[in-house]
Amino acid sequence: MKANIVTEKTNLHPRNKHRFGYDFNDLIKTSTELKKYVFINEYETQTIDFSNPDAVKALNNALLIKDYSIQNWNIPKNYLCPPIPGRADYIHYIADLLAHSNNGIIPENESVVGLDIGIGSNCIYPILGNSIYNWSFVGTDIDNNAIQNCKKIIEQNPKLIDAISLQLQVEPRYIFKNIILPEDKFAFTICNPPFHNSAFEAAKSSIRKVNNLQEIRTKNPVLNFGGQNAELWCDGGEIGFITQMIYESAKYPLQVLWFTTLVSKKENLPSIYKILDKVSAVEIKTIDMAQGQKNSRIVAWTFMSKPQQNAYTF
């Protein structure tokens, strides 16, 4: 099979394993299922059709086996299939954030506990965080089917059993309530919030993404992105979800070192900063991220003073 032409993806985090793209020859050795989806494009490089959900899932499987020692990863039909390089970037920037509060040293042990809000069916942030930095996680979701699939992934990968616990959010209008208990302490929260404020808006966005990938126009594309309602949209959209998250976070000022969330829409930032000011966040950080044509950012905030951050024990 033709050799890869490797181009460094300078927009990915310097520690990201996928910074130099995919070595499809090696990935196929790891998972032969991937082979049938790999082809040579017009630029004479190996790739897959990223609008094909089966191809994307096969690529993810190979990456998780080769780079993160995860076997038997699977997601149900019509659930989100996450792009692993972008998810890994979020984890690496969290590590930098923790180092900021730890004399420049990234804490790498199981006593670092993260809270994944909206773990989905793929369990991807806890998988990556545990594999890369040996962190532990609590993963929550309002979708019991998603929780049950994460449970299967964990059971089939024994190294995850003691590292990841799961909790169903029984009151969907809340984010941290019922989840953060009085005795809990989290180094960080992580969240990829629903972007859209309706099913119609979510469908339009997915069609646009597939059309961009396939370079053809279609009203009924096969969506490699998938996604259940709770993964894609909620009342108030992204800004509504993050607003709720910020107001709730103020109730747990000393139980979480850093609250964080992805923010897809740059125009939402001014409103987010205003709300953070209202709840008297002590420190706010905005971290720009990019993958391919997609630009995003992480907003992080803490209610702890610098001395309190320095006193936090991992």
Image: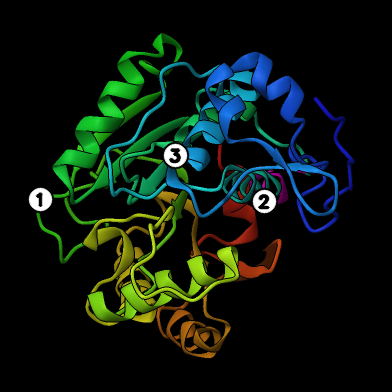
Q: How many marks?
A: 3
Q: Residue 81, relative to residue 70: is it above or below?
A: below
Q: Is 74 left or right of 34, judged from the image as shown?
A: left
**Residue labelled with disc 2:** 93
Q: Which one is in front, 302 or 135? A: 135
Asked if the magenta segment contains residue 100, the reply would be yes
Find residue 23 and report its image quarter.
top right
**Residue labelled with disc 3:** 54
Question: Pointers 3 and 1 in contact (CB under 8 A)?
Answer: no
**Residue labelled with disc 1:** 170
Q: Which one is in front, 210 or 157? A: 210
Please state the extent of the stretch shown in magenta in the rendering.
97-103
Residue type at tag 2: Tyr
Q: Secondary structure at mark 3?
A: helix
Going from the N terminus, do you reach mark 1 or mark 2 first? 2
Residue type at tag 3: Asp
Asked if the magenta segment contains residue 144, the reply would be no
Residue type at tag 1: Val
Q: Distance between the Cα atoms at labels 3 and 1? A: 32 Å
Instruction: List x then y, in percent, for residue 41.
Output: 75, 49
Position of the N terminus, as image quadrant, is top right
Q: Residue at x 15, y 66 (%)?
A: 173
Q: Which one is in front, 244 or 279? A: 244
Position of the C terminus, as image quadrant, is top right
Going from the N terminus, do you reach mark 3 or mark 1 first? 3
